[in-house]
Image: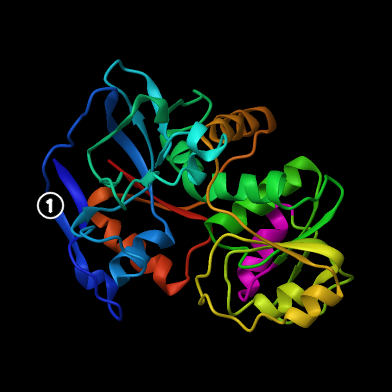
């Protein structure tokens, strides 16, 4: 089969470690299913793998990709949940299972013609969602769903500030928050992207460092080091900062004085549960909200999509059709 593979890590030129072409068919243990991939979304995580960040021993070479939608062996249209774990071992959350594995990390990923996963990782794809739209949900949109609805502590009507709002998680947060009745504020460096965020439903859209109307109840941040000082300053007393990424670096000055003096909470999160993915798909159907897709490319041009993500020129998600 054809696949997009991280063959080696090149920290300063990640795409040099990318290889596309023939790859062995996925193995299928007992209780697993093989999905014919129709669409797969790209993520910053793919670039981190190519850079050699947080690799597990023996990971490379590996098929990239963690998000996909396709058709299983019985002809069912499905969304692939990318966490292979036991919910019971994680207290009801597969991502907290100490033995959990992730597609494109310990297991081959979704940027291929076929991918194998446990049957419990198959979520029915609603017919109202295209394969490209459904492929955006397991990573960025599931992460945003849990950040906003579970981790933020903010109820509809509350003010939430989204840092790095033009990316996949950011556009998901703006879209989901607007649909659910939150007051969504967004930060973006680009004037054109700020205009588009307002069209998505952001009530206030500002450039980095620009003064906000007032303090936010929660800040939702995937950027990390570059936005950390602003995220803390933007919170009201008792507010909460939810972090799900660190695209600009992971070691900011903590500013502990501000955190304890203002009784702020800092909460980390990664993805979500399979049950939350099913509810997210239902939420999209019921509200009419759809993932923002910057561009759709054939699988053979996945490298071009990753280059666009690396340069920061995308608004929303990049999806590859198989």
Residues 99 and 195: in front is 99
Residue located beneath label 1 in the image:
21
Residue at 41% across / 31% down in the picture?
Answer: 121
Quick check: 211 left or right of 313? Answer: right
Q: Residue 241 versus residue 44: which sits nearer the camera?
A: 241
Q: Residue at x 33, y 29 (%)?
A: 118
Left or right of residue 92: residue 288: right
Q: Position of residue 270 (x, y in %)?
A: 53, 52
User: Visible in this render: residue 208?
Assistant: no
Considering depth in this image, is 308 or 106 the residue closer to the camera? 106
How would you rate the neighbour count of disc 1 (Cα within 10 Å): few for under 14, some for 14-19, many for 20 or more? few
**Residue 317 in picture, x, y percent from top left:** 48, 54
Q: Residue at point 54% right, 38% down?
A: 273
Residue sitting at x 53%, y 48% = 271
Image spot of residue 250 (x, y percent) = 52, 75
- The span shown in magenta is 187-201
Q: Quadrant of the C terminus?
A: top left
Whether 116 is drawn above or below 184: the answer is above
Q: Main secondary structure of the magenta part?
A: helix
Q: Quadrant of residue 17?
A: bottom left
Judge whether residue 239 is colored magenta: no
Mark 1: secondary structure: strand
Residue 71 location in percent, x, y?
33, 26
């Amino acid at each position: 089969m054809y696949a997009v593979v991280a063959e080696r890590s090149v920290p300063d030129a990640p795409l040099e470690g990318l290889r596309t072409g023939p790859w062995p068919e996925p193995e299928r243990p007992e209780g697993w299913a093989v999905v014919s991939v129709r669409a797969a979304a790209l993520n910053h995580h793919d670039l981190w793998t190519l850079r050699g960040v947080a690799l597990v021993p023996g990971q490379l070479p590996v098929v990239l990709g963690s998000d996909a939608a396709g058709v299983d062996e019985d002809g069912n249209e499905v969304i692939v949940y990318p966490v292979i774990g036991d919910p019971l071992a994680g207290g009801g959350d597969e991502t907290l299972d100490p033995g959990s594995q992730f597609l494109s990390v310990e297991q081959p990923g979704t940027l291929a013609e076929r991918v194998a996963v446990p049957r419990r990782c198959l979520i029915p794809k609603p017919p109202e969602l295209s394969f490209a739209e459904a492929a955006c949900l397991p990573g960025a949109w599931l992460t945003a769903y849990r950040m906003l609805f579970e981790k933020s502590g903010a109820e509809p009507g509350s003010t939430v500030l989204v840092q790095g709002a033009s990316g996949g998680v950011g556009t998901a947060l703006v879209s989901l928050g607007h649909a659910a009745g939150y007051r969504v504020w967004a930060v973006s460096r680009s004037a054109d992207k700020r205009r588009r965020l307002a069209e998505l439903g952001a009530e206030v859209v500002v450039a980095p460092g620009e003064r906000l109307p007032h303090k936010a109840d929660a800040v939702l941040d995937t950027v990390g080091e570059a936005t950390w000082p602003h995220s803390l300053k933007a919170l009201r007393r008792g507010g909460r900062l939810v972090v799900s990424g660190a695209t600009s670096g992971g070691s900011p000055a903590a500013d502990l004085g501000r955190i304890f003096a203002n009784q702020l909470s800092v909460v980390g999160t990664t993805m979500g549960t399979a049950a939350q993915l099913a509810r997210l798909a239902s939420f999209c159907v019921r509200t009419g909200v759809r993932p923002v897709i910057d561009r759709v490319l054939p699988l053979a041009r996945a490298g071009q999509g990753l280059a666009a993500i690396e340069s920061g020129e995308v608004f929303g998600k990049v999806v590859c059709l198989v």
